[in-house]
Amino acid sequence: MKYDFDKIINRDNTFSVKYEERIRNFGTNDLIPLWIADMDFETAKPITEAIKKRAAHGIYGYVSKPDSFFQAFCNWQSRRNNWDIDRNLVSFSPGVVPSLSVIVNEFTDINDKVLIQTPVYPEFYDVVEAWDRIVLENKLLEKDGVYSVDFEDFENKLKHGTKLFILCNPQNPVGRVWSMEELQKMTALCIKYNVLIASDEIHADLMLWGNKHIPTATISEKAGKITITCTSCSKTFNLAGLQASFAVFPDKNSKDKFDKFWKNLEIHRNNCFSIVAMEAAYSEGEEWLKQLIPYLENNINYVRKYCKANIPQIKPSKPESTYLVWLDCRDLGLSNEELNDFMINKAHLGLNSGNNFSRSLSGYMRMNIACPRSVLEKAMKQLDSAVNNLNGGIKSNYIRGE
Ligand SMILES: Cc1ncc(COP(=O)(O)O)c(C=O)c1O
């Protein structure tokens, strides 16, 4: 069937964080929310049908996790990523962030060093610091809006007592799809210095422009032995509210350690809707995803072209994956505080502040473009007019580096 991603769906009164926490987050409801990473699109029909069928049953008692649930996940990985997973080494978890948090807690000790590559999803800082571990930052190098790994710094940080490396593959917010060569280099160094890898692959299905995801655990046999992969189809199919994800382990010991943590908290069951929804997603959702990707690509192209033609002071990235566009706003000449205030109160846009992704960064914002095009068009017009009104109505012609 043909899906209509242009359709505007009112999300009011659904407890949507993106909409209903605008006041808490931005101090106003008067803005277009393009922040937290979920989509304003209806998910695939087989998923909504599976949930409706389950809901119609009327009994929502305790459920076990059927083998078919895990098998659907394994089949997806095998079919799409050439990754043959031992089903016995897959665990359930209520979310990728919870998994990362448990890995930090279970596989490192207090005051241990954990390496992350910034700018990165802010929860990477949070899950490390929550358990009194120390964050080491391997800052990504940026050249003309393209990011790469600073391998010299990476190795230096690994050398000096890093226990765990949390890798974002593909990367949020800069949208990089790490190449085979980059992954080989990163994993080889982790093997050399005996560093465990937690690979967050939650955005892996959102490959743009024909890119191909390479699971970190498949880089080599040795890489597979030091990698725990945390993933889900919650980003892919807009199912974050169902709270379900997978963790794939290199061996039974590490899986048991992880499972025990959840068991001790008595958190070891899914909700009944996540099982049927994710099974349907992995088994029958591909057609929807195939139609989603070009829609996202067109939205990204639109934002980039619009800025180039009308707001050259703002330079949007071209993500290789994800529906998140990283905006370089440094040419606006605003401090982080001023930039936030500008986006909220002048452009009336709810974006994520760049310095949440790297604490020392200034002049960046992250924009979620997974919304109908008409919403994005309105957002860009608002941004254009706000930039026009900066500096007393004179649009700055200053472009950094030119
Ligand atoms: C890199 C990354 N990991 C994890 C998450 C959230 O995962 P979960 O909702 O499964 O905890 C996000 C959400 O944006 C993300 O971008």
Image (cartoon, rainbow, N blue to C red):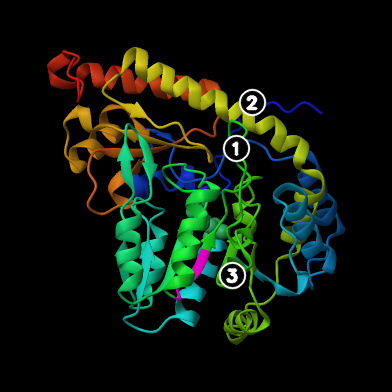
Q: Give, as a single range, the part of the protein colored magenta.
A: 194-198
Q: On the rendered structure, is 100 left or right of 14?
A: left
The residue that appears at 48% across and 51% down in the rendered structure is: 182
Question: Which numbered dot is residue 211?
Answer: 1
Q: Which residue lies furthest to the left in this view?
A: 392
Is 83 placed above or below 391 here?
Answer: below
Q: In which quarter of the image is residue 77?
A: bottom right
Q: Where is residue 270 in the image (x, y as percent from the top left)?
A: 70, 68
The nearer-to-camera label among 1 and 3 is 3
What's the magenta bit mostly, secondary-structure-wise? strand
Q: In the rendered structure, which amino acid carries the disc numbered 1?
A: Asn
The residue that appears at 60% across and 54% down in the rendered structure is: 241
Distance Cα–Cα, label 3 vs label 2: 47 Å
Question: Which numbered dot is residue 7?
Answer: 2
Is residue 216 in the magenta section? no
Precedes in sequence: disc 1 or disc 3? 1
Is 88 placed above or below 74 here?
Answer: below
Q: Position of residue 286 (x, y in %)?
A: 76, 40
Is 105 placed above or below 75 here?
Answer: below
Q: Name the residue under label 3.
A: 222
Q: On the rendered structure, is 319 left or right of 39?
A: left
Front-most of residues 205 and 35: 205
